[in-house]
Image (tube, rainbow, N blue to C red):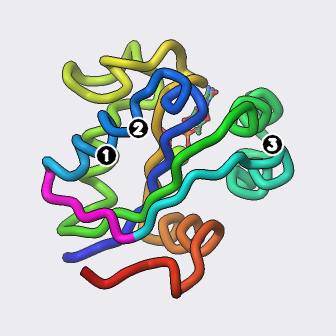
Amino acid sequence: MTERTLSIVKPDGVRKNLIGEVIKRFEEAGLKVVALKMTHLTKQQAQGFYHVHRERPFFDSLTSFMSSGPVVLMVLEGEEAIKKVREIMGATNPADAEPGTIRKLFADSIEENIVHGSDSAESARFEIGYFFNALEVFER
Ligand code: CDP
Ligand code: MG
């Protein structure tokens, strides 16, 4: 099934000059970039994005990190896009990530793990709509 998913190159990924590295891996997997922008999230915007984690002990640190520098937001489209992106990213904790995944290769810690990808169709819908309006997502 063709799906859309939201991915983010997090502030550590931008600082490490990995924007192209991340997008290249998605494109090589056959996914299409259908929306793309750079922004610097406010703490409040990061809190809204990660509201499902608001009770978690890492919430304050995570939202400070996510608002610590610019990020690259993108919508990816393709067959099983949600699962494909999660596989290319690797596990949340780079120590547990499969060899060859973005997080295994490039992440420093469970928090600073380079990249985000939606974890379900429901979260993809919420996350795409959080950052992009209909005119900013393209047919291609
Ligand atoms: O990003 P992913 O879906 O793999 O993980 P999550 O469980 O949805 O957590 C969201 C983000 O919170 C992670 O990507 C990490 O940046 C951060 N996190 C953390 O700092 N400490 C944890 N124990 C778990 C997650
Ligand atoms: Mg998640």
Q: Which residue is mark 3?
A: 55
**Quadrant, the C terminus:** bottom left
Percent coordinates x, y for residue 126 in the rendering:
59, 71
Question: Residue, x 60% and y 24% (percent of image)?
Answer: 111
> In the rendered image of this protein, does residue 9 appear above or below residue 60?
below
Do tag 3 and tag 2 residues touch (Cβ < 8 Å)?
no
Callout 1, which amino acid?
A: Ile
Give the spatial CA distance, label 2 vs label 1. Answer: 6 Å
Q: Which residue is mark 1?
A: 23
For residue 19, the mark is 2
Mark toward the viewer: 3 or 1: 1
Q: Which residues are magenta?
A: 29-34
Question: Residue, x 65% and y 51% (percent of image)?
Answer: 39
Q: Nearer the viewer, residue 134 or 57?
A: 134
**Quadrant, the N terminus:** bottom left
Give the spatial CA distance, label 3 vs label 1. Answer: 31 Å
Percent coordinates x, y for residue 53 in the rendering:
71, 46
> In the rendered image of this protein, does residue 13 appear above or below residue 74?
above
Is residue 82 located in the magenta-colored stretch of the structure?
no
Give the spatial CA distance, label 3 vs label 2. Answer: 30 Å
Mark toward the viewer: 3 or 2: 2
